Amino acid sequence: KQTLRFVRFVKQAKEALKDLGFHVLLAGASGDAVYSEKVRKELLEAFPTAIIVDSFLSANSLGAIFRHTALNFHPCSYDAYGMTIVEAACFGAPSVIAEGDGVGAIALIRGNGCIQVEMPKNENDFSEASVKKVVDFLGNREARDSVSRTAKANALAWGEGAHGEKLLAIMNRASAEIAASKE
């Protein structure tokens, strides 16, 4: 989903990424071979040492990648949920996410466990201000560590117990409303 936005970021930030010593990795399979080839070609032109894993990853492989990830880049301006945001956060890798509430996972990560930047609907757009915000974050180890801890804590807080408590609260509220309507 809008992977070219990630490529635009890499093109704009390539010197800073090199100066900061970061590696670029693009992982995931695409159902559109033409789009995938365009993304691959442009990414390697922008950052020739980029690593591209163009297949679906097992849970173990994904975990191995996220354990070594400083920042996950979720490039779409809208996503019903954005599971990779939560998966990355579980390993302490915060995500760059579109500002606002267009990506559902923001409800779980709650803003403090991610970096939110402007991501217009046109995937070719990624502003200099957004690039600067991401690069500044990557260059600030203290901020990265803090956001990483928050992302991980927020992602892992929603387990079976939290789900059960929420479900019980909903059921109790519904039961009370039904009882009140019968009075």
Image: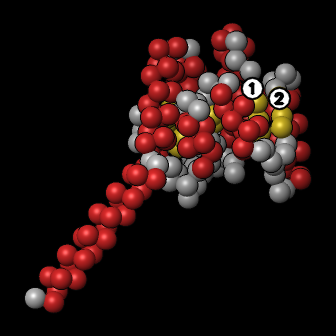
Please determine whether, in this image, residue 144 is positioned above or below residue 105. Answer: above
Query: Residue sitting at 74 percent across and 38 percent down?
Result: 60
Q: Give the quarter of the image for residue 175.
A: bottom left
Specify the quadrant that holds the C terminus: bottom left
What is the residue that sits farthest to the left in this orientation? 183
Query: Residue sitting at 40 percent across and 52 percent down?
Result: 161
Q: Residue 100 location in percent, x, y?
A: 44, 47
The answer to whether residue 118 shows anywhere in this view is: no
Circles 1 and 2: CB atoms closer than 8 Å: yes
Q: Is residue 138 left or right of residue 25?
A: left
Please determine whether, in this image, residue 181 is positioned above or below residue 106. Answer: below
Instruction: Give the residue at mark 2.
Output: 51
Q: Which mark is residue 144?
A: none
Q: Nearer the viewer, residue 108 or 37?
A: 108
Q: Residue 96 location in percent, x, y?
A: 56, 35
Query: Residue sitting at 59 percent across and 32 percent down?
Result: 91
What is the residue that sits farthest to the bottom in this orientation? 182
